[in-house]
Image (spheres, grey):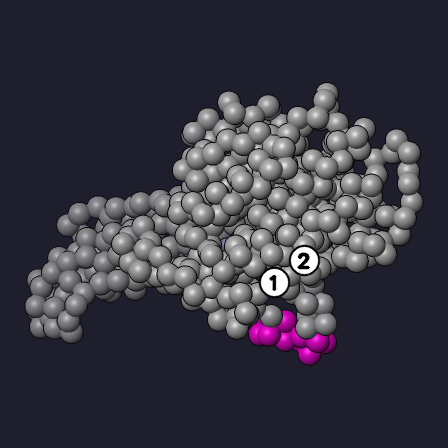
Amino acid sequence: MESSSHPLLEEETMGAASPSSVLAALDDVRGWQEEFYRDLHEHPELSHQEQRTAARVSERLGQIGFEVHQEVGGTGILGVLENGDGSVVLLRADMDALPVREATGLSYASTVTATDAAGTKVPVAHACGHDVHVTCLLGAAQLLAAAPDQWAGTVVAVFQPAEETGDGARGMLEDDLAGLIPTPDVALAQHVLPAPAGHVGTRAGPVLSAADSLRIILYGRGAHGSMPQAAVDPVVLAAMIVVRLQTIVSRETPPGETAVLTVGSIQAGTKSNVIPDHAVLQLNIRTYSEQTRATILDAVRRIVTAECQASGCPKEPEFELFDSFPLTDNEPATTDRVATAFGEFFGERAGPMGQQTASEDFSDIPAALGVPYTYWGIGGIDVETYRRAEAAGRVAQDIPVNHSASFAPVIQPTIDTGTAALVVAALCWLAR
Ligand code: ZN
Ligand code: ZN
C-alpha cells in the first residue's frame, strides 16, 4: 500500500468513521515493523515453543500502552487497550512456525533448528507467514494507541501460540482467556496468502475447511509369508480400505459439496516374507459443514469396520481422532461490514476471496465467546511476479504456497496492507 498517496489519506472527514486519520501515522511504524519482521523471520519457533516471540510481543505491547497478560495457554499473550465507552474488538494473530527447512534464499532466512514434541531435531521456518500476522497486529495496535481521539471502545490483541497444531486457541481458552478480557463484540483475524501483495480478500460463509486427522489401527494375524492360510493379512485389508474410502467423496457426498479425504500414511510390515499382524492408516479429512463432516467420519468408521469383518480380523479396528480444526464460517453481516470498509479504503485492491481448503483454529475463540467473526486474506506475492505467472498460466507451478520451503512474502506492501486492514476493520466498530 502506498499510504501517502492514498486518496483517502488526503481527506479529513470530521466525526465520520475514517481510518485515514489513524493510518496517517503508518510512516512512523513502518520502520520498526520491517526490522521486527526480519528479526521474527530469522528466529522462528515451533508450536508451543514461542517464548522469544512472546517476549518481544509483550515488550512492545507494554511500551505502546496496552495492559499485557503473559503465558496465557502456554506462550499466549493478551493485550487490552481501553479507550472509553464503545465496542470491544478482538484482533488475533498466530505466532508459531513450522518444521520446514527454509529455501527462500532471503538475507534474513532462518537457519534455526529446534527439538519438536516427539524429541526430534528439526529445521524451523516461518513458512506459513505467521510472522507477518504478528508484525501487522503490533503495528495496528500501535497506530490505534497513538490516536485515542479518533476512536472509542476497547481493543483486545490476541497473540496466539500453536495454530499449526490446532490446539493453541483452545489452550488460551482453557487458561481463562474469557476471564482476562472484556467480552468482545466481534473477533477479527487475517492470513497472508499466495496472492498479489497489497490486495485483501473477504468471503462470507464457510471460508476455511474443518480438518480432522484420523489414525486407524487394523488388526490382522501375522504368519510366514509362505503360509497365507494361517494369516489375516492386514496389508491386503489396508489396500482394500484405501480403495473403498475413495467412494466416500465420489459416491456418498453430494456433487455440489466440497470435501477431501486423503490417506496420507499407510504402514505395515518389515520384511517380504513376514505377513504382519497389524497395519496403521492415517487419514486427513476436509469439510465445509458440520453435517458433511459427521457423515464422512461415520462412513469411514462403517467402511473400515465392515472391511475388517469381511477379512475375518481377530480384533475390532481402533480409531483415534487428532489434529482437529474447526470450520471457519464467516458471519455474513460482520463480513459485509468489513468488506464495505475495505472497498472504500483499498479500492480495486479489495475483492472476494475463494474458499480455501486450508484450516485454522481461530474460530475456536469467537465460538467459545459466542461472538461473530470474520477472517480475511491478504496477498504476499510481489504483484509483477504474480501477474507474470498468471499470464503464463503457471500460478500453481511458480508461486510458492504457504508451508512450502520457498514461501517468502514480500515485506512491502504486505506489512502495510495487513496493518491497514486490521485498523480499517477494527474501526468499523470503534469509530467515534
Ligand atoms: Zn500453516
Ligand atoms: Zn497459517
Q: Earlier in the sequence, mark 1 or mark 2?
A: 1
Classify mark 2: helix, strand or loop.
Answer: helix
Give the position of the C terminus as an image quadrant. top right
Residue type marked 1 = Pro
Segment tinted magenta in the rendering: 387-398
> Callout 1: 10 Å neighbours few (<14), some, many (20+)?
many
Q: Residue at x 32, y 55 (%)?
A: 115
Residue type marked 2 = Thr
Decide whether the magenta segment is chiefly helix, strand or loop: helix
Q: Nearer the viewer, residue 72 or 308?
A: 72
Q: Is residue 395 magenta?
A: yes
- Residue 1 appears left or right of 411: right
Which residue was labeled with disc 2? 414
**What mark, if any, has residue 105 been given in the picture?**
none
**What mark, if any, has residue 409 been given in the picture?**
1
Classify mark 1: helix, strand or loop.
Answer: loop
Give the position of the N terminus as an image quadrant. bottom right
Q: Nearer the viewer, residue 260 or 43?
A: 43
